[in-house]
Amino acid sequence: MTEATTRGYAPAGDFVRLTSDEPLVFELAGRLWEPAAPNDLTDAIAIEVRRAWKGRAEASGSPQRNAIPFTYEKEQRWVHEAHQFFCEVPGVLDLTIEFARARVDARIAPALSLQCSKTSLFPPSTSLLSFLARTLLEAPAAVLLGRRGWQVLHAGAVVGPRGAAVVRGPSGAGKSTLVAAARSSGLGLLGDESLFVSRKDPDVLAASVRDLALREDSARLLGIFSATEPAFTGREKKCRVDLFNGSSPRDRSARRVASVLLGPRDPGPARLVPLSGPEFLESFRAGEIPQERSPGDPEAAARAWASDGGWLLSGATDLEGAVQLLKGLVT
């Protein structure tokens, strides 16, 4: 049996002390965060991932080789309590996030550990690796980072040579479609629905859970459906664009150069209208969701950004035109 090892990592503006007896976990962490020195870990977030089972009895033969990550996502259950969160995929993994101790304790089933082993006859797929990184490391760390130096914002962000443009709007406004179209045109991204804003400097942005999941009609509209994989997020079936394969820590942070709020999608053509400070604040509020205030104050970022106004993007059914407008802000 492999002995547990501890290593340090540095997500933007913070530190993580990761302990595990599963070597693959460290490979996944290296895709997300830069390494950190031991003397940086005094007040670090603690994440421990063990190959042991303390939850429900492990399902016989679970997980099967053909049990795709979509199945795990669909069976995933989160329980939110005042002082901690629980997450479980029955028979596969479970974890607890403790707020006061800034600690994550995760357990993975022996069968899953065997599937992830380098000695396995059937190495894990990229989509399974992405699922494990997101569930065991990225999402739990994001829960705790959002209670430390970062404000969680319901927004996406696209990145170019000049920096990042925040893209914010109500659910269903087209953030994911627009961000995906911008990525297809060559821009980078921090995410499509969830973004971190530094509490110290609101122009410093970071990925919380760096993800891109679209409805099937949007994926087909963009001509990328065949290049996506099935996903189950937001309680519905979607299509995920693979951002994990080839990803690195440098893809996870940028400096804000523009704020774009989504207005009516029709009629085209796409157009950017400058907003005054009060207009920006009013439109910004339209994109708020409860999770932004648990805990936090999303309008702290809005007030800081309102000083340089911002933009209202309307007519984004003209996707090509909308993407060109975004490119003009970040390149």
Image (spheres, rainbow, N blue to C red):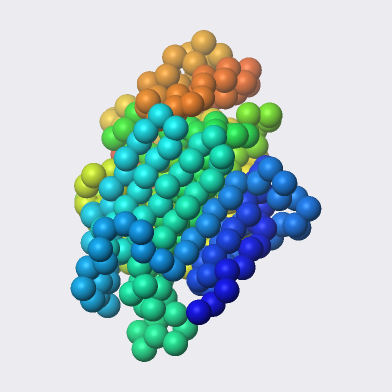
Q: Where in the figure is residue 318, as x and y percent of width and height?
A: 34, 41
Q: Is residue 260 above or below residue 114?
A: above
Q: Can residue 22 be seen in this view?
A: yes
Identify the residue at horizontal 71%, vertical 50% (top origin): 41
Depth check: 148 or 214 in front?
148
Direction right: furthest residue: 39
Identify the residue at horizontal 37%, vertical 27% (top origin): 289
Q: Where in the figure is residue 275, as x and y percent of width and height?
A: 51, 18
Identify the residue at horizontal 47%, vertical 52% (top origin): 105
- Image-based side of 15 in relation to 165, left or right: right
Q: Is residue 20 above or below residue 213?
A: below
State which quadrant residue 168 falls in.
Answer: top left
Depth check: 291 or 261 in front?
291
- Image-based side of 79 in relation to 24, left or right: left
Depth check: 314 or 113 in front?
113
Q: Where in the figure is residue 141, as x and y percent of width and height?
A: 52, 47
Identify the residue at horizontal 40%, vertical 40% (top origin): 85
- Image-based side of 47 in relation to 71, left or right: right
- Image-based side of 115 in relation to 187, left or right: left
Q: In this view, does 100 lie above or below 69?
A: above
Q: Is residue 218 visible?
A: no
Q: Is residue 153 above or below residue 5?
A: above
Total numbered labels: 0
Direction top: furthest residue: 278
Q: Where in the figure is residue 102, as x and y percent of width and height?
A: 56, 41
